[in-house]
Image (tube, helix red, strand yellow):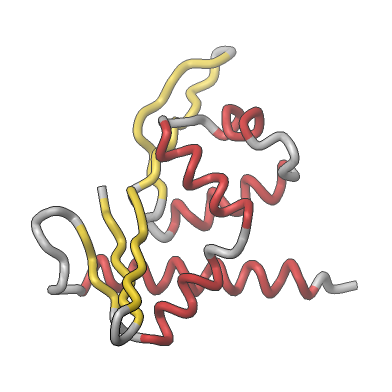
Amino acid sequence: MIDWDSKKESLQELELMKAIEYEVKTSSKSDSSGWVHIKETKKIGEILSTLGDPLTRQILIALNKKPHTALDLMEEIPDAPKTSLYRKMKDLEEKGVIKVDSFEQKENKKVAVYKSTIMGIQINMKDEIDLFIHIK
């Protein structure tokens, strides 16, 4: 049986990562402070829709506070299913939203320590909706 909610959530997350990755790599709208300006309504909708996912938000918030290993994140977000957490972290890393900051030794194993590459997102709603992503 196919879990359509899970599939929809994964597709939404993928769209967010693609939109952010594209803007970061191609945007000439980024200023020296690290803010990337997104004006395209469709991309803004995709990003905001994906940020509706509570686990994605929890991961990004935790990694903005301080770097974490996957095990640290499991402790900080105890209600998250282990496989969902690993899957989201893998997706976020592949798209450049989180990255390996360092490695530490735990129980004779080298373990990755992750941090977020996004410091914040700002939405302005004057004449239109503008989205700004603050890149570290």
- Residue drawn at (63%, 55%), measured in percent from left and top? 54
Instruction: Name the quadrant of the N terminus.
Output: bottom right
- Give the answer, above or below, for where 124 lies relative to 71: below
Q: Nearer the viewer, residue 52 or 105?
A: 52
- Give the answer, above or below, for where 60 lies relative to 75: below
- Residue drawn at (49%, 71%), measured in percent from left and top? 48
Tell me if 27 is positioned left or right of 87 in this view. Answer: left
Residue 6: x percent and y percent? 74, 67
Image quadrant where residue 28 sits: bottom left
Tell me if 112 is positioned left or right of 75 in this view. Answer: left
- Give the answer, above or below, for where 12 lies relative to 65: below
Tell me if 78 is positioned left or right of 40 in this view. Answer: right
Q: Nearer the viewer, residue 66 or 101?
A: 66
Residue 105: x percent and y percent? 47, 16
- Give the answer, above or below, for where 2 lies relative to 82: below
Q: Residue furthest right?
A: 1
Q: Residue furthest top?
A: 107
Q: How many marks?
A: 0
Residue 25: x percent and y percent? 23, 68
Q: Nearer the viewer, residue 112 or 121?
A: 121
Q: Nearer the viewer, residue 90 or 20?
A: 20
- Residue drawn at (64%, 46%), measured in percent from left and top? 85
Tell me if 71 is positioned left or right of 92 in this view. Answer: right
Residue 104: x percent and y percent? 44, 20
Q: Residue furthest left?
A: 32
